[in-house]
Image (spheres, grey):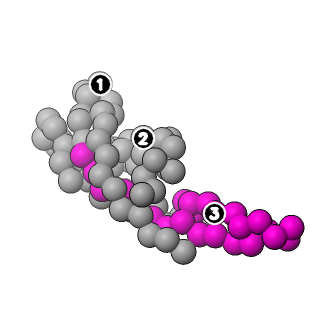
Amino acid sequence: MEHFLKSTNGTVNVDGIDFDYEAIVSGNVVGMRQPHGEFHSEIDKTSVDVEIENITPEPTNEQSKKIYSAVYDDVMGKNLWDFVD
């Protein structure tokens, strides 16, 4: 098992407002030997964590939960292998 940690940024739209974000993405890559002998690695999607470091403009408390969900969906929609060093 290999752990990865990488920063990313992007923009999400919540309530008609574009919010720019910076986040740290972490998770695990797990590997297993296949029956025919090859080694196969994949990202354990259940281990992926997204920690938001910065959001602009400053959201209201009500928007914060929606933004976290939108950022998580945005990150999970990216090629997660780009986060693995």
Q: Nearer the viewer, mark 2 or mark 3?
A: 3
Q: Which amino acid does label 2 sit on?
A: Asp
Residue beneath the point at 36% across and 44% down: 71
Res 74 label? 2
Is 24 a magenta residue?
Answer: yes
Q: Which mark is residue 16?
A: 1
In the rendered image, the residue lying farthest to the top is 16
| Residue at 30% from the left image edge and 33% from the top image edge | 11
Neighbor class of circle 3 (other Cα within 10 Å; few <14, some 14-19, many 20+) is few
Amino acid type for the residue under numbered disc 1: Gly
Q: In this view, does 72 lie to the left or right of 11?
A: right
Q: Does residue 76 appear left or right of residue 20 in this picture?
A: right
Displayed quadrant of residue 20: top left
- State the residue position of label 3: 41
Q: In which quarter of the image is the C terminus?
A: bottom left
Calculate the distance from the C-alpha at mark 2 to the C-alpha at mark 3: 23 Å
The location of residue 9, given as percent across then percent down, is 29, 41
Q: Residue furthest front?
A: 37
Chain part drawn in magenta: 22-45
